[in-house]
Image: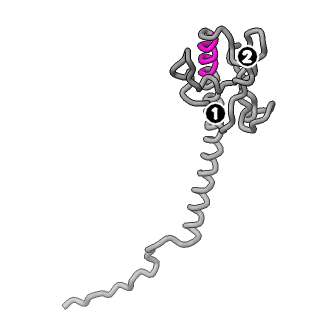
Amino acid sequence: MCCRRFEPRRRNARKAFSLVEVMIVIVIIGMLATVVTVSVRSYINKARQNTARHEIATIIEALDTFYSIYSRYPTNEEGVEILARSSEKLPDPLLSKLPVDPWGNHYQYNDLGRGDYEVICYGADGREGGDGIDADISSKDLRK
């Protein structure tokens, strides 16, 4: 009979990853997530600014419709709020709801007199002035 050779078991057979390997993978995933988050944030900010421009354009249309019905623009006291209310001449409001900018602030309406007005979004900081994401967006800018 032939002798059966016994082969020793391999001790180097791997059944799992070491802690160091797992930590390296986690660090790499974290770095990739950071890069993606930073690059996506700029797109989100631009989308918010574009949304504010679009909403201002909608408010301008409602203001022009208001003017065609009442032969005047709303006063500073009435503001944009009057566009979201029904009236005797307008059973359905011109705006379905009172608009707020993408950062949750109300749009500022200024009646400049002589048939001129301005609708302003003060940007992410909600204050006048600013750069980048905090920059003001005005109806005057949209008309240029």
User: Of the numbered discs in the image, which one, if any, rests on residue 100?
Assistant: 1
40 or 20: which is nearer to us?
A: 40
Magenta extent? 58-67
Asked if residue 34 lies left or right of residue 17, the reply is: right
Task: Tell me the SS state at disc 1.
Answer: loop
64 or 143: which is nearer to us?
A: 64
* Percent position of residue 24, x then y: 59, 63
* Percent position of residue 21, x then y: 56, 67
Q: Residue at x 71, y 13 (%)?
A: 144
Q: Which residue is mark 2?
A: 117
* Percent position of residue 43, x then y: 62, 36
> Please, what is the dominant secondary structure of the magenta stretch?
helix
Q: Residue at x 64, y 24 (%)?
A: 82
Q: Are marks 2 and 1 in contact (CB under 8 Å)?
A: no
Q: Is residue 42 above or below residue 8?
A: above
Q: Is residue 89 above or below residue 121?
A: above
Q: How busy is the neighbourhood of tag 2: few (under 14 within 10 Å), some, or many (20 plus)?
A: some
Res. 62 image quadrant:
top right
Res. 125 image quadrant:
top right
* Percent position of residue 134, x then y: 75, 35
User: Of the numbered discs in the image, which one, if any, rests on residue 16?
Assistant: none
